[in-house]
Image: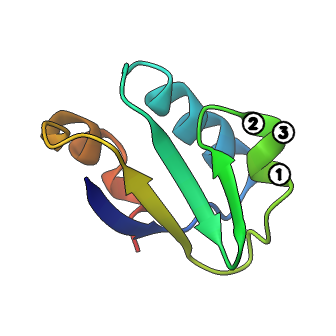
Amino acid sequence: MKTVPILLSSVNSVKEFVNAVNKYDFEVNLIVGSHIVDAKSILGIFSLDLSKPIKTEIHSDDCDKFLTEINEFVK
């Protein structure tokens, strides 16, 4: 498992991030405080406070391609 902070500052960035996550079979969770949402759920993401960086847990050790794809969101 890997953890990275991301920042989703616009509706378009949320859409791009969700599209990237949905290409992969492994689980990705977004964590803000005690709230945990599935990163493949656009509605779940919009329930979070997007004004601050979000802790992202990637449940795979083979996620380098994914990390490259979401690099623009990594804080």
Q: Which residue is drawn at 74% across and 49% down?
A: 45
Q: Is residue 74 left or right of residue 52?
A: left
Q: How far apart are marks 1 and 2 (CA)?
A: 6 Å
Instruction: Look at the numbered discs 2 and 3 and tell me whether their residues touch, using CB distance below 8 Å.
Output: yes
Q: Name the quadrant of the C terminus.
A: bottom left
Question: Callout 2, which amino acid?
Answer: Ile
Secondary-structure class at tag 2: helix
In the picture, the disc for residue 42 is 2
Instruction: Look at the numbered discs 1 and 2 and tell me whether their residues touch, using CB distance below 8 Å.
Output: yes
Residue 60's place in the image compared with 47, above or below, is above
State the scheme by which the image is colored.
rainbow
Q: In this view, does 67 lie to the left or right of 47?
A: left
Secondary-structure class at tag 3: helix
The residue carrying pointer 2 sits among few (fewer than 14), some (14 to 19) or many (20 or more) residues within 10 Å by Cα, namely: some
In the picture, the disc for residue 46 is 1
Q: Is residue 17 left or right of residue 2?
A: right
Question: Callout 3, which amino acid?
Answer: Leu
